[in-house]
Amino acid sequence: MAPRRSKTTRRAPMGIAANLEPRTVRGRTDSPRTPVAIRARGIDVDEALDGHIRERCGFKLGKFAEAIDRISVRLEDVGGPKGAPSMRCAVKVVLSRHESVVVEVVEADHRAAFDHALDATERAVRRSLERGRAKVRGRVRD
């Protein structure tokens, strides 16, 4: 019987205890040990935004932490010099033994863009993992 996941770390902030060991050495990880890379262009990522991103990733994706290799969050200001402010958020989740999930959203605010992208990412990761389980069982549904 496989060991049960700890419920205390299931929705903990992601990436707070991540290390740089490769996944093959690290093995399956819980939420705090799943690496989250935050990249930004044209936006200052302060401590509050960094904490918000890690906390929301843990809350939304922590239940899938054992199947996730790493997460990358990219924030970018794509508004032109005359245009309205628009922020792009791209979230990439690299899954073990599945294809990566990439979601991009453009909103007026970087926090709103991230929140909408993360909601869509949670649904996409769930679908990808369910599809993988169905293929293993021999019941492919598309």
Image: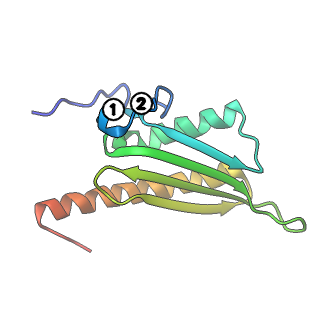
Position of residue 120 measured from the top left corner of the image (x, y, whole percent): 49, 58
Rendering coords of residue 116 (x, y %): 57, 56
- Residue visible at 32% across and 28% down? 7
| Quadrant in which residue 27 is drawn | top left
Mark 2 surroundings within 10 Å by alpha-carbon count, few (fewer than 14), some (14 through 19), many (20 or more): many
93 or 49, which is in the foreground? 93
Q: Examine the rendered structure and indicate whether residue 51 appears above or below residue 87.
A: above
Looking at the picture, which amino acid does disc 1 mark? Answer: Arg
From the image, tell me which residue sits under label 2: 33
Residue displayed at 47% across by 55% down: 121
Image coordinates of residue 50 in percent, x first then y, are 63, 35
Instruction: Give me the C-alpha separation between circle 1 and circle 2.
Output: 9 Å
Q: Is residue 74 left or right of residue 110?
A: left
Q: In the displayed image of the protein, which residue is found farthest to the left?
A: 1
Q: Which amino acid is tagged 2? A: Arg
For residue 128, side relative to residue 113 (left or right): left
* Residue occupying the far right of the picture: 82
What residue is disc 1 on? 26
**Residue for point 36% across, 25% down:** 8
Task: Give the numbered dot on residue 8.
Answer: none
Give the image's coloring scheme.
rainbow
Quarter holding residue 46: top right
